[in-house]
Image (tube, helix red, strand yellow):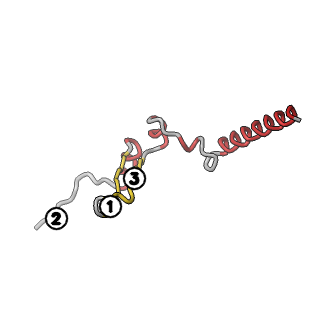
């Protein structure tokens, strides 16, 4: 009995490249109920895609997250300084 071999092998790198190029969505819901009373619902959505593909889809949250982006952190600091300066001006006017 002969063992069949694939003529074209697909390795993990090829599969990963395809997934990142096209993107893949994994979705699921978990519900906990007792006697028809819903106690907990967890909705899980996972998107696996390359950065380029995600930006193509309009997903770019990492650019505005101050924990991940130094530019966003600096912008957040500048905004806070403007708020504090405006508060100081308001307090001076009231005094």
Residue 33 circle label: 1
* Mark nearer the N terminus (2 vs 3): 2
The residue at the point 34 percent across, 57 percent down is 38
Q: Which residue is mark 3?
A: 44
Q: Circle 3 sits in a helix, a strand or a loop, which is it?
A: strand
Q: Quote the CA–CA distance across marks 2 and 3.
A: 41 Å
68 or 2, nearer to the observer: 68
Image side of residue 80 versus residue 22, left or right: right
The residue at the point 13 percent across, 65 percent down is 2
- Indicate the quadrant containing the C terminus: top left, top right, bottom left or bottom right: top right
* Mark nearer the N terminus (1 vs 2): 2
The residue at the point 40 percent across, 55 percent down is 42
Q: Which residue is mark 2?
A: 3
Dot 1 alpha-carbon crowd within 10 angstroms: few under 14, some 14 to 19, many 20 or more: few
The correct choice, above or below, for 82 with respect to 28 in the image is above
Label 1 vs label 2, nearer the camera: 1
x then y, percent, for residue 89: 84, 33
Residue 13 circle label: none
Dot 3 alpha-carbon crowd within 10 angstroms: few under 14, some 14 to 19, many 20 or more: few
Q: Circle 2 sits in a helix, a strand or a loop, which is it?
A: loop
């Amino acid at each position: 009995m002969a063992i069949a071999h694939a003529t074209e092998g697909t390795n993990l790198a090829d599969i990963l490249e395809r997934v990142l190029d096209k993107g893949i969505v994994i979705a699921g819901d978990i519900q906990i109920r007792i006697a028809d009373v819903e106690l907990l619902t967890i909705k899980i959505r996972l998107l696996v895609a390359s950065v380029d593909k995600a930006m193509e889809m309009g997903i770019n949250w990492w650019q505005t997250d101050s924990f991940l982006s130094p530019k966003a952190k600096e912008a957040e600091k500048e905004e806070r300084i403007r708020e504090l300066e405006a508060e100081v001006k308001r307090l001076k006017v009231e005094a």
